[in-house]
Structures are given as structure tokens and as C-alpha cells.
Image: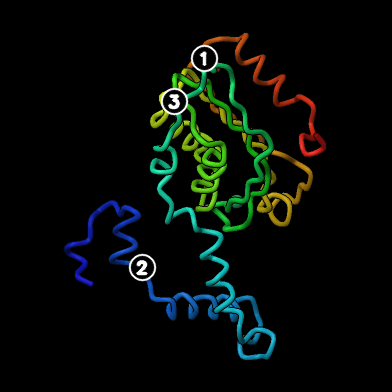
Amino acid sequence: MNTLTMPTKLTGEDIAQSVRPTRAEAEAAVRTLLLWAGDDPDREGLVGTPDRVVRSYEEFFAGYEIDPVALLERTFEETDGYDEIVLLRDIRLESYCEHHVVPIIGRAHVAYLPHRRVVGISKLARVVDAYAKRLQIQEKMTAQIANTIDQVLQPRGVAVIIEAQHQCMTTRGVHKPGVAMVTSRMLGAFRDNAETRRELLAMIAGSGNAGGL
Ligand SMILES: [Zn+2]
């Protein structure tokens, strides 16, 4: 690669096209980490591990291949004037801490106040995945999900609340299991109107197990 033509700030597309290693290089890197951990990568139990880890990475980091804006572009306008809160509660969230590359596991609540159009509810869950399945910090992920919904749907308000456990805190470092980190980003009416925000928080606290309906 000609380093003189490397852009100073790489976009995802640059990485995909120019600096992304081959699959064999990725597997070799895993083998190095197995050696570093102190084990023998050639023993029977580990010989297929580099391949399996690289496949796992394809799942863990599938979000880089998803365009969250495109997910939200198809909307429906036949809502009979529905303009109250739309809330998707308890969306399972699996992400990966960008500092330690270990899981962040939790749930997200995503709400918006429609302005003339709505989006298929599964799309909100897909937007969560598109940003979660990347190397992340929870604060940035929360803001990215809310900002994208705000920019594409242009609703009267957006709220994203994420509560999650960080395995870099539970299985290493300070070793504090059971600690949840909660982040929220409120835009539009959810930020400006205390009544609307209260209504949302009551809906989230709501009846709990909708699966039992
Ligand atoms: Zn971490």
C-alpha cells in the first residue's frame, strides 16, 4: 500500500477498501493472541479457534455493514393522525466495548413522537443493532441511535434510554458485577416538555412483561 495516499482520517469505506486485512491475516492475529495467552494454538481444541473467532467477529461487528439511515427511509403516512408516543421497550442490546473488546449487554428503549409519518417498528430495533454491533462506548451509541432517528424521521421528539452491563467492569478491572450503566438522549418534546418526558418514563416503567399479554 502506498502510505502517501492514505487519507489522514479513515472512513469505514476506506477501511473496507484499502487497509482491511485478509481473512488469513485476521486468523493469524488470533493465533498470536492464543500464544500470548500462554496456550498452544496447534493443540486439537484450539486448532479451529482462529477461524471460529474471525466468524464470531463477523457477527459481533455486523453493524459496520448496515446503513442505519437507509433502514429508516421507508415510512408510512396513513396513521389516521396518530401523534402520540411510539415506544419500543426492552430491545435486547449486545455491543462491544471499544476499550477492551468485551461485551456490553443490556436493553434499549426507543421512543419517538411521530410527525405525520411512522416507521415499521422492527426498523427501530434494527437501528439499535446497526450501532450496537460495532466497537462502542455506551454514551456515543445512545446519541447515534437518537440522532439518526431524529435526522431521518424528523419527528417531534426522540428518546433513547440504554441500560447495560459492561463485562470490562464485571469480569476484569474493578470486578463489580450487577452494576448497570444507564444513559439517555432526549430530543425535541422529550427534552423540552417535562410532561411528555414523564409520560414516556411511566410507559417504560409500565406493565413490564408485554410478552404475557
Ligand atoms: Zn471496556
Disc 1 target residue:
189
Pointer 2 or 3: first along the chain: 2
Residue count near mark 1 (Cα–Cα under 10 Å), binned few <14, some 14–19, many ≥20: some
Task: Name which quarter of the figure residue 87 lies in.
Answer: top right
Q: Position of residue 39 (x, y in %)?
A: 66, 83
Q: Position of residue 27 (x, y in %)?
A: 50, 78
Disc 3 target residue:
77
Task: Name the residue nearer the viewer: 42 or 66.
Answer: 66
Quadrant into which the C terminus falls: top right
Task: Name the residue nearer the viewer: 46 or 75.
Answer: 75
Pointer 1 or 3: first along the chain: 3
Label 1, label 3: how far apart the Cα atoms are: 21 Å
The structure's colour scheme is rainbow
| 82 lies left or right of 7 | right
Q: Position of residue 42 (x, y in %)?
A: 61, 90
Residue count near mark 3 (Cα–Cα under 10 Å), binned few <14, some 14–19, many ≥20: few
**Residue kind at label 2, given as amino acid type:** Arg
Tell me what residue is drawn at x 50 percent, y 20 percent. 157
* Label 2, ligand 1: CB separation under 8 Å: no
Task: Name the residue nearer the viewer: 123 or 75.
Answer: 75
Task: Name the residue nearer the viewer: 94 or 10.
Answer: 94
Disc 2 target residue:
20
